[in-house]
Image: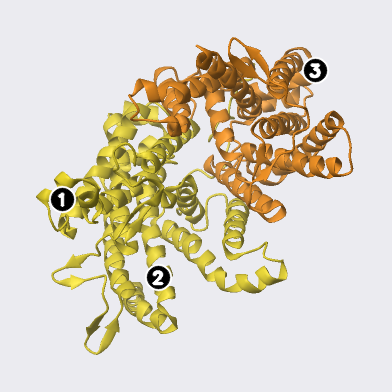
Chain colours: A orange, B yellow
């Protein structure tokens, strides 16, 4: 029974991280129909930036919680600037180009960011410092530490804030209008280019947050750390219904739970033939099932012909 | 001289150049011939993917899975792995199973085609980006299995891969050995060059014929407008499955060749990066256009290898941070971005025969998204 609760906790924590990244994907896809392949790399840059800031601030003896806040802010700023520039350089000139062109520049950007990270930070994995004392609490035989509680709370608060932003504020209305029809939105006094830039900046901030929490939870950072979470977050976004913020959240959390449960029980279920190394395939199996059975995702609306 | 003669002359010169290219390259060392060989393999892969992406418009990001299927099939049928692992198998084939080329290539093609259809079947309703991400997932699933199928029953030998794979033998000619023909030394890599070249030429002919055929027309109709194609009586389901199967066949055959050429396969050769690279070759060159695809493949496969030779001074200058592998990735990434930005239709796109210009008002209605 304690394994069960433990896997639920692990799944929720992992799912929260996926959800934060999925929000960035889903907003960008909702507005300009582009899979931003470089989004996972933004997470990686955020994590590595915070690692640099955190290790150097700890070196001069600053207290842990302050270092955490500052390194998180640094990561958010760097990622926002980065994603803003990526959109401007690699995606904006291709808005009217054939659909595969921006997808290729996005893949190129992903590769470029990984390579640059390898040059700047060297390819070896680096331990992420412990900033908050990881005092574990016990719930029914399972343990949860401060970082994990922090992740769950931050994600919930962030999602609530984002929902408010998109559904209640002027910028949110402009975003929804641009998603519906950029030309008409333009005629109504919305500046689509500005709205799209804002979307990329918000997505980057969320990815930076997710990156820092991911690094703090798993204790290690590396140039290749962004790719798989990025891919799974996209899966989560599709799972929930792309373009739907609540869907991204639900999709992320469910995917995290499925992965944790799968990894925890696949050995028992298959009599030891398949082990927990197969954790990574659950996301893709879910994706294939969802897309064939319910292509619009769990909470998505039916889009007649999405080419 | 009229145009016809001119064309014939060009063909003859190009043919002669292709035939003597490895003989010239081998003067500078076999490493150069190897680079050309690998580039030819990529041409084969890119031609296969071009059937799926270029003709039928189905974006496949898991293409490398079929390459892996072909490579592992040869790896299992022509290496000592099975006899070493399974005593029962060793009892049946005491000298190991050394499957011959004429059996393995059709088998590899068939198996990969079966995988292609198996992937295609559940994804028929999907298009564009959704299809891309599902195929990507499929590629990853295959890779995870290749990496982990070493326990409890050792089938793929896990991350260590399969080694000591036989080289090809055709009519007593062993491609793995150096031969002496008419006083001319033909090392193994040069032998493989001719084998690959022959297959590339056959593939180009097949692709060209496909493009002109009813099937090719049907694929392009599906690519341009699936609903209209269906309305005109095209069986879109079968045509899409056929495209997946055909494309996968090319992947499978390339995989068999790759395994025999290397003598070794491991899951590392079939990473997602490889799939992305092949898609990039097709799109950079000029999607759906055979010469463009070939140029794209040669460029992305060979250029980075050549750049290895400039890399060592750079590496010293930058304190070891910019080694050849990193420089190679950096250049590929920059090329992908720069070429797409300057030529979104690829380096050598399909000539437009009275087609609508991109961006004309009737084409491509504004993408309509949703955000809630």
Residue A6 shown left or right of residue B259 in the figure = right
Whole-percent x and y of residue B192?
A: 30, 69
Disc 3, SS: helix
Residue A283 shown left or right of residue B21 in the figure = right
Residue A142 shown left or right of residue B223 in the figure = right
- The image quarter containing residue A240 is top right
Is any part of residue A215 visible from this angle? yes
Q: Chain of mark 2?
A: B
* Mark 1 → mark 3, Cα distance in angstroms: 73 Å
User: Which label was assigned to residue B90?
Assistant: 1
Q: Viewer-nearest of labels 1 and 2?
A: 1
The answer to which of B127 and B315 lies nearer the viewer is B315
Whole-percent x and y of residue A251?
A: 55, 19
Which residue does the image show at 25% across and 38% down from the upper left? B114
- Considering every residue shown, the one lying at the far left of the view is B92
User: Which label was assigned to residue A170?
Assistant: 3
């Amino acid at each position: 029974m304690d394994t069960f609760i433990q896997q639920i906790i692990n799944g929720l924590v992992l799912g929260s991280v996926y959800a934060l990244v999925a929000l960035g994907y889903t907003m960008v896809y909702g507005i300009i129909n582009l899979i931003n392949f470089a989004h996972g790399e933004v997470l990686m840059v955020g994590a590595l930036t915070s690692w640099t800031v955190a290790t150097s601030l700890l070196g001069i003896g600053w207290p842990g919680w302050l270092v955490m806040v500052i390194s998180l802010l640094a990561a958010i700023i760097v990622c926002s600037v980065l994603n803003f520039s990526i959109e401007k350089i690699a995606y904006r000139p291709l808005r009217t180009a054939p659909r595969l062109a921006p997808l290729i520049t996005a893949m190129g950007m992903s590769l470029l960011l990984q390579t640059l990270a390898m040059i700047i930070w060297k390819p070896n994995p680096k331990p992420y410092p412990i900033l908050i004392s990881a005092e574990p609490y016990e719930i029914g035989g399972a343990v949860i530490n401060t970082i994990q509680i922090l992740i769950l709370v931050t994600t919930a608060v962030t999602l609530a804030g984002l929902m408010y932003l998109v559904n209640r504020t002027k910028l949110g209305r402009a975003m929804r209008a641009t998603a519906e029809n950029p030309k008409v939105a333009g005629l109504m006094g919305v500046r689509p280019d500005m709205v799209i830039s804002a979307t990329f900046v918000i997505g980057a901030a969320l990815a930076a947050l997710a990156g820092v929490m991911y690094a703090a939870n798993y204790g290690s950072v590396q140039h290749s750390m962004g790719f798989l979470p990025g891919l799974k977050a996209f899966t989560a976004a599709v799972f929930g219904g792309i373009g739907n913020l609540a869907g991204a959240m639900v999709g992320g959390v469910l995917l995290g739970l499925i992965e944790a449960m799968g990894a925890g029980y696949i050995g028992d279920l298959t009599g030891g033939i398949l082990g927990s190394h197969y954790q990574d395939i659950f996301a893709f199996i879910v994706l294939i099932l969802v897309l064939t059975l319910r292509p619009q995702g769990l909470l998505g609306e039916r889009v007649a012909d999405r080419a | 001289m009229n145009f016809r003669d001119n064309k014939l002359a060009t063909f003859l010169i190009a043919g002669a150049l292709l035939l003597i290219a490895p003989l010239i390259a081998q003067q500078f060392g076999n490493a150069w011939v190897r680079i050309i060989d690998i580039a030819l393999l990529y041409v084969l892969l890119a031609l296969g993917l071009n059937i799926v992406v270029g003709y039928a418009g189905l974006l496949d990001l898991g293409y490398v899975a079929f390459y892996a299927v072909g490579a592992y099939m040869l790896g299992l049928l022509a290496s000592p792995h099975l006899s070493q692992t399974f005593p029962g198998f060793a009892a049946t084939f005491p000298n190991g199973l050394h499957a011959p080329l004429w059996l393995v290539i059709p088998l590899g093609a068939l198996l990969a085609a079966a995988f292609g259809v198996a992937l295609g079947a559940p994804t028929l309703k999907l298009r564009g980006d959704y299809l891309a991400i599902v195929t990507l997932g499929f590629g990853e699933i295959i890779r995870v299995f290749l990496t982990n199928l070493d326990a409890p029953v050792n089938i793929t030998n896990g991350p260590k891969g399969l080694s000591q794979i036989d080289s090809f033998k055709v009519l007593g000619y062993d491609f793995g050995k150096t031969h002496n023909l008419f006083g001319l030394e033909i090392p193994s890599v040069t032998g493989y060059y001719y084998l690959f070249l022959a297959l590339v030429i056959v593939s180009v002919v097949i692709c060209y014929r496909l493009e002109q055929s009813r099937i090719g027309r049907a694929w392009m109709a599906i690519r341009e407008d699936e609903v209209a194609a269906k309305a005109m009586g095209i069986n879109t389901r079968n045509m899409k499955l056929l495209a997946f199967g055909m494309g996968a066949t090319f992947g499978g055959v390339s995989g068999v060749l790759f395994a025999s050429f290397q003598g070794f396969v491991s899951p590392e050769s079939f990473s997602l990066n490889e799939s992305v690279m092949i898609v990039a070759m097709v799109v950079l060159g000029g999607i759906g256009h055979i010469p463009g695809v070939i140029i794209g493949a040669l460029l992305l496969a060979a250029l980075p290898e050549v750049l290895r030779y400039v890399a060592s001074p750079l590496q010293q200058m930058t304190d070891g941070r910019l080694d050849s592998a990193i420089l190679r990735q950096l250049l590929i990434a920059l090329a992908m971005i720069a070429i797409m930005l300057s030529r979104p239709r690829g380096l050598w796109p399909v000539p437009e025969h009275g087609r609508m210009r991109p961006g004309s008002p009737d084409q491509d209605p504004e993408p309509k998204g949703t955000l809630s």
